[in-house]
Amino acid sequence: SNSSVFAEFESNYTFDEETGTLTLIGDINKDELSQWFRHSDIKHIVAAPGSKLPEFSDFLFSRFAGESIDLSNADSSDVKAVRCMFSYCENLLSLDLINFNTSKIQNMQYMFSNCKSLRSLDLSSFDTSNVTTLLGMFEYCSSLESLDLSSFDTSSVVYMATMFFGCSSLTSLDLSSFHIPNAKYMGSMFYNCTNLKSINMSNFETKNVIAMNAMFENCQKLESIDLSNFDTSNVTDMS
């Protein structure tokens, strides 16, 4: 049975077979989690008060096949790495990150890549002031219908390539709050956003950007785009 396999670290997890809910208690460990994912039919993950996310949380929930993750009660104050943290959670319908502490994080690349079933995502509590790369952050989030990034501080961001690649359910995107004095790479940023009708990028400072290749490729429905501050003097690749 499952319970005997996990006896050695049972104290940090409880699993309810009836509801398919795995409750995380205490220190959350990447290797132990991946063992659970292999052996159990987990539909829901809930972090209990007192649970703690590890400093290196990259790939932590990657390829989890269930439908919900609630980390609202997890202590995330130590987290420094979140690369691919929820990548390929293809059945995920609900992700609660409302109290997630991202103040120490520099790299958010592919954090939600291929969360193909996720329709909404509340990132209003994210502190992105130290983040330098948002590369592919929402790549292939193809069911995402809206995204409010107005709380994002993008002043340190250098890499934004493929950030919204394949977000084919987004119809509008307001990035007017984005101030990006250090941004350099925007290649394929909105590639295959096939339903995107409007983008507000009115405050984009692009004087340091060197790559804008395929930025709006395959955005066939795009009707309105505010590029009023675009400065392409240093762009070497606009292909």
Image: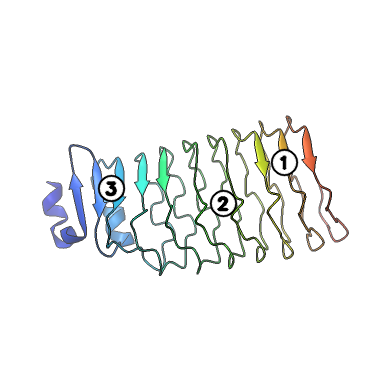
When asked about the image quadrant of residue 169, the answer is top right
Name the side, left or right, on which 145 lies relative to 1: right
- The numbered dot on residue 163 is none
Q: State the residue at coordinates (53%, 34%).
A: 143
Q: Amino acid at mark 2?
A: Met
When asked about the image quadrant of residue 196, the answer is top right
| Disc nearest the viewer among 3 and 1 | 1
Residue 218 in the image: above or below residue 69: above
Q: Residue furthest right?
A: 233
Task: Identify the residue under disc 2.
Answer: 137
| Disc nearest the viewer among 2 and 3 | 2
Q: CA distance from mark 3 to mark 1?
A: 41 Å
Residue 51 position, x and y percent, is 29, 61
Q: What secondary structure is found at the residue carrying circle 2?
A: loop
Task: Identify the residue under disc 3.
Answer: 38
**Which of the two discs, 2 and 3, labels the residue nearer the N terminus?**
3
**Which of the two discs, 3 and 1, labels the residue nearer the N terminus?**
3
Name the side, left or right, on which 135 lies relative to 60: right
Task: Identify the residue under disc 1.
Answer: 199
Residue 96 in the image: above or below residue 11: above
Q: CA distance from mark 2 to mark 3?
A: 26 Å
Residue 58 position, x and y percent, is 44, 60
